[in-house]
Amino acid sequence: MRHLMSPLDFTVEELDDLFDLANDIENNMPKYAHACDGKKLATCFYEPSTRTRLSFESAMLSLGGSVIGFSDAGSSSASKGESVSDTIRVISCFADICAMRHPKEGAPMVAASKSSIPVINAGDGGHQHPTQTLTDLLTIRSLKGNLRDFTIGLCGDLKFGRTVHSLIHALVRYPGIRFIFISPEELKVPDYITDMLKEKHIPYEEVIRLEEIMPRLDFLYMTRVQRERFFNEEDYVRLKDFYILNKEKMKLAKQDMLILHPLPRVNEISVEVDDDPRAAYFKQVQYGVYVRMALILTLLGIKTNV
Amino acid sequence: MLNVGKIEEGFVLDHIAAGKSLAIYHHLQLDKLDCTVAIIKNARSNKMGKKDILKVECDINTLDLDVLAFIDHNITVNVIKDGEIVDKKDLVLPKEIRNIIRCKNPRCITSIEQELPHVFVLSDEKKEIYRCKYCEEKYNERLQRYPWK
């Protein structure tokens, strides 16, 4: 039985298969409408995350399955002190697959070690959010046609941003990727990531100003400075408005550059950019549903006749 | 010159960083064994300036080499039989260590679920970096590898 804890759990070839399946789902939705008839997805969300939870639920419902679960720790038996290990053993009796979000890092891994059903890490603290990374990869692959030879700028909170860390680790497995990290000094990408890039001889730059590198980017991945990752409110307030992408800055970008964002945004992308054809962040949400559908089918071992 | 008698069967841990022998004594749980132990602190060493030495008279199999390797793989382990050194064990960094150090990341699941073992995995052998199996928090501070007073 397979689980998904990190985007690196799948080989590049397995990801290609997953993305092929996701693209087939995108183009032939009715074919998959009953693929999960009689199957149940448990969404165990120990912290609020409407977007990710609804994306999982939408994915399962689109496959003909049904959904059970809870959406915050207060309404689960965790509030009575039940361990993650015990909860997943119980959930295993109720559902066929589980998507787990937990504020503590490694909780889904603990669950997977005791589970008799596949567990998907739907985000664990500042650690991993693999289905977001799969969404990002599928979006890039679908809109660009492949996952090679491009320059991607990652902007904002590169220190605590788990989506950024996961995406970097996932992209280094593809050829010809160049990274430009755009962040204030306090939110720079951690050393262990730049060390890894040096070791693999993957080109990267670190800059503070977004404007100076805009013309060179094929993708711009914007991120939100997240209040919940800071222990100190003062630091959060000081850094939250450091980058705001607006029409003026977009004038500097290539005509075919694409903007991605894991959402939700606060104000780091001005709403005036939404109508720009290069804004791909809402398409990204749709790809998130397709990739979760493909993932559920893959982990459940359900094959549909193509 | 201080004289400590020979041991007949057991092991001698040489080249322990000065002042760290007691931590190793506790962590190898030698206090729980009913055997002769000699702790020599701040012995003169050409190589290290000062060093600690532990002499333990007991079955060599009772020694957890993985723990020792994690604490300091530069320690020399001499195996003694019939009063003579019969073997020198090479210490190799263990791939995984369990319940030797604790994850200090307040966001780690081990911070709230007390029954979970604290497992660290060797992620970079060259740099001697261990990461928590659950949250991947780094642990590579050599001095912190003697966390026991």
Image: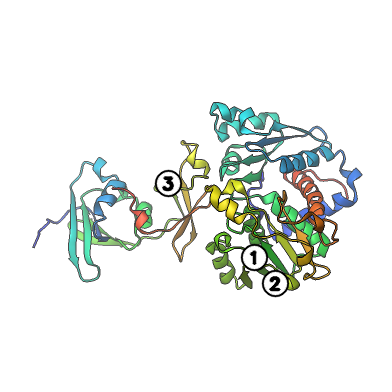
Q: Are marks 2 and 1 in contact (CB under 8 Å)?
A: yes
Local crowd at mark 3 within 10 Å, few (<14), some, or many (≥20)? some
**Which disc is residue B102 wearing?**
3
Q: Are marks 2 and 3 on the same chain?
A: no
Q: Sequence-wise, which precedes: disc 2 or disc 1?
A: 1
Q: Nearer the viewer, residue A243 or B87?
A: A243
Callout 3: SS:
loop
**Residues packed near mark 2 inside 10 Å, few (<14), some (14 to 19) or many (20 plus):** some
Q: Chain of mark 3?
A: B
Q: Secondary structure at mark 1?
A: strand
B96 to the left or right of A83: left
Side (left or right) of A246 relative to B62: right
- Answer yes or no: are tags 2 and 1 on the same subunit: yes
* Chain on which label 2 sits: A
Q: What residue would you read off at disc 2?
A: A213
Q: Chain of mark 1?
A: A
Residue marked by disc 1: A182
Q: Quadrant of residue B78?
A: bottom left
Whole-angstrom CA distance, mark 2 to mark 3, is 42 Å
Q: Amino acid at mark 1?
A: Ile
SS label for mark 2: helix
Residue B45: image x %, image y %? 20, 67
Q: Residue A211, relative to residue A16: is it above or below?
A: below
Inspect the image, locate mark 2, and give the three-letter code of the amino acid beneath it: Ile
Q: Mark 2, mark 3: which one is toward the viewer?
A: 2
Q: Position of residue B77 (x, y in %)?
A: 28, 59
Bin the neighbour count of mark 1 within 10 Å (Cα to Cα): few under 14, some 14-19, many 20 and up.
many
Distance in Å between CA atoms under marks 1 and 3: 34 Å
Q: Amino acid at mark 3?
A: Arg
- Name the residue: 17% across, 57% down: B83
Between A186 and B55, the residue placed more toward the observer is A186
